[in-house]
Amino acid sequence: MNYQETLDWMFAQLPMYQKEGKSAFKKDLTNTLALSKVLNFPEKKFKSIHVGGTNGKGSTSHMLASILQEAGYKVGLYTSPHLKNFTERIRINGIEISREKVISFVQKHKNFLEQQKLSFFEMTVGLAFDYFADEKVDIAVIEVGLGGRLDSTNIITPEIAVITNIGLDHTQFLGETLPEIAFEKAGIIKQNVPVVIGEKQNEVQQVFLDKAKTMNATITFASEDKEMYATDLLGDYQQKNVKTAVATIQRLQGFQVSQKNIENGLLQVVANTNLKGRWQILQEKPKVICDTAHNKEGLALVLHQLKKEKYKELHIVLGVVSDKKLEEVLPLFPTSAHYYFCKPNIPRGLSEEDLMAKSKSFQLFGEKYESVEKALQSALHNANQEDMIYVGGSTFVVAEII
């Protein structure tokens, strides 16, 4: 199989959560452990940092990788989902895994992957861990896919665990309340492994304190740190992630990281890791910004940031996935903006008609478009140079225009 055929085969094996939704969620680690055994336990051959949480785990993971790269280490980075190319998920010092490595891994293990009925995400985790072990990384930053306790990445025993915050997302899998979701996320806290919690939230802090006590894990709440650092990731909301990343590095044992490494790492996140889609400015006059925020807490931060921008008229290109609770996110959006409703090009995408109809009840008005590209082109056509265009609502909307 060539690269495209290999990817098509992987995507077809078992539904992929990002495209299909609930049917792709698996509730145990049996498959991942079976694959690990076949691969000769690659996760035991490299050190790691495990990063979970509802929002900010991607940005925090990239910050951590960037800082460790500045300190001269060979750093693996595993994140999901990808925006443009599958290989974005698996990087070493910012360089994506080669297509050849993806092909050879699948060819070598294809029979086992089929027999065991591994999901797309499970085999991708196996590929990442196998690659990091082969390449002898000094440390790998591993971002949780979904939840924590039962996530495929949770076969690692990291040097330190990180949970950024808890918000209401993926409630159909993780629970309807913040403490229920926190319980799932807290599943990455391991025996005697320190944990950093990004934000101290009254509703859930006890869940983490209890779990840390049970596991004899030292616990730190990063939001209590007063230090401020500059970062090249735009948006005030990144300061929460900065604090989390810095607190983690400061508590990471066995690695030599200077204050200068921390400062430079935070200023070079995009250059060192190739992060995209976080308050990313695509052009000026009119200013076009995209952001992958897609749940209540994430969108609240981004829309707050939007209020600080100076513009004449605001145009919003908006698309969402069908399992999003619109009654929670739509009230966050400004009623004064012009809307361009669209459907991200995945099976899970909500139709532009449905989104437009639902938005009307929240006084959000505009036109509908059959693709993200057409919606953006229309916004660019309508906007003058002093206007601003925001593109978002879903990772998959952003993926189509960057």
Image (cartoon, rainbow, N blue to C red):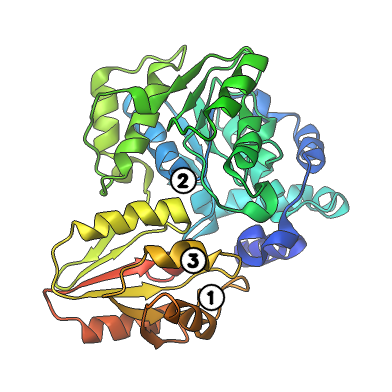
**Disc 3 to disc 2, C-alpha distance:** 16 Å
Residue 246 vertical position relative to residue 255 in the rendered view, above or below: below
Q: Earlier in the sequence, mark 1 or mark 2?
A: 2
Q: Compared to 287, does 186 lie above or below?
A: above
Q: Residues within 10 Å of mark 2 (few under 14, many from 20)?
A: many
For the point 32% across and 42% down, the residue is 238
- Compared with residue 341, is residue 140 higher up or lower down, i.e. above or below? above
**Of 76 and 368, which appears nearest the observer?**
368
* Secondary structure under the numbered disc 2 in the rendered image: loop
Position of residue 375 measured from the top left corner of the image (x, y, whole percent): 37, 82
Above or below, comparing residue 38 to residue 293 in the picture: above
User: CA–CA distance between discs 1 and 2?
Assistant: 23 Å
Residue at the image position 44 percent from the left and 30 percent from the top: 200
Question: Which of disc 1 and disc 3 is earlier in sequence?
Answer: 1
Answer few, some or many: residues within 10 Å of disc 1's Cα (few below 14, many 20 plus, some between 14 and 19): some
Closer to us: 401 or 329 = 329
CB contact under 8 Å: marks 3 and 2? no
Q: Are the residues at dot 1 and dot 2 in contact (C-beta closer than 8 Å)?
A: no
- The amino acid on which the numbered mark 2 sits, given as a three-letter code, is Asn
Comes first in the chain, label 3 or label 2: 2
Mark 3 neighbour class, 10 Å CA radius: few under 14, some 14 to 19, many 20 or more: many
Which numbered tag is attached to residue 396?
Answer: 3
Secondary structure at badge 3 equals helix
Q: Are marks 3 and 1 in contact (CB under 8 Å)?
A: yes
**Front disc: 3 or 2:** 2
**Disc 1 versus disc 2: nearer the observer:** 2
Evaluate whether residue 393 shows in this view: no
Residue type beneath disc 3: Phe
Residue under circle 2?
55
The image quadrant where one finds the C terminus is bottom left
Nearest to the observer: residue 96 or residue 304: 304
Q: Quadrant of the N terminus?
A: bottom right
